[in-house]
Image (spheres, grey):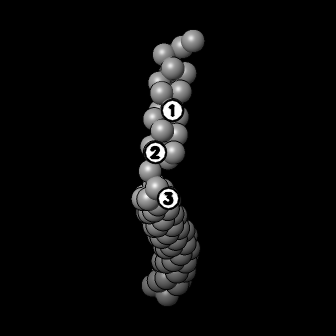
């Protein structure tokens, strides 16, 4: 038997002894409370991940728009240069 298996069995026996030895429902309230806290933490984690991905997507869109604007400005500069050359040559 490995050490982990032995520890797992000890924990299981300890929980069973506590469960069978108490008439109070503290055990169930404690488990429910822990599950509720974990659920809240998981929802918050998912929400933060979604917010982060939205910001990443927004940054990507902004970068694409900037690249397009720079390309448009470059074309406009070439046209202006060409027009200047035609006008003053």
* Residue drawn at 45 percent across, 35 percent down: 14
* Residue drawn at 51 percent across, 20 percent down: 6
Query: Which one is in front, 57 or 45?
Result: 45
Q: Dot 1: few (<14), some (14–19), or many (≥20) neighbours within 10 Å?
A: few
Residue 12 at what x, y percent from top left?
A: 52, 34
User: Residue 21, labelled with which disc?
Assistant: 2
Query: Which one is in front, 87 or 5?
Result: 5
Q: Dot 3: few (<14), some (14–19), or many (≥20) neighbours within 10 Å?
A: few
Task: Point out the residue furthest to the top here.
Answer: 1
Q: Which residue is mark 1?
A: 13
Distance (Cα) linking label 1 and label 2: 12 Å
> In the rendered image of this protein, does residue 25 appear above or below residue 78?
above
Residue 78 at what x, y percent from top left?
A: 52, 75
Distance (Cα) linking label 1 and label 3: 17 Å
Residue 18 at what x, y percent from top left?
A: 45, 43
Q: Dot 2: few (<14), some (14–19), or many (≥20) neighbours within 10 Å?
A: few
Residue 40 at what x, y percent from top left?
A: 46, 67
Which tag is nearer the camera, tag 3 or tag 2? 2
Distance (Cα) linking label 3 and label 2: 14 Å
- Whether residue 56 appears in this view of the structure is no
* Residue drawn at 48 percent across, 16 percent down: 3
Which tag is nearer the camera, tag 1 or tag 2? 2
Q: Quadrant of the N terminus?
A: top right
- Mark 1 and mark 2 in contact? Answer it, CB < 8 Å: no
- N-terminal of the two: label 1 or label 3? 1
Q: Which residue is mark 3?
A: 28
Task: Point out the residue furthest to the bottom here.
Answer: 87
Query: Which one is in front, 25 or 30?
Result: 25
**Secondary element at tag 1:** helix
- Whether residue 30 appears in this view of the structure is yes
């Amino acid at each position: 038997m490995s050490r982990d298996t032995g520890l797992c069995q000890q924990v299981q026996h300890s929980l069973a002894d506590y469960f069978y030895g108490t008439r109070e429902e503290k055990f169930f309230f404690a488990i429910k409370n822990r599950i509720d806290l974990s659920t809240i933490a998981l929802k918050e984690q998912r929400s933060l991940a979604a917010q982060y991905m939205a910001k990443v997507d927004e940054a990507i869109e902004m970068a694409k728009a900037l690249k397009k604007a720079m390309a448009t400005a470059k074309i406009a500069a070439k046209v202006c240069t060409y027009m200047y050359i035609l006008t003053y040559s």
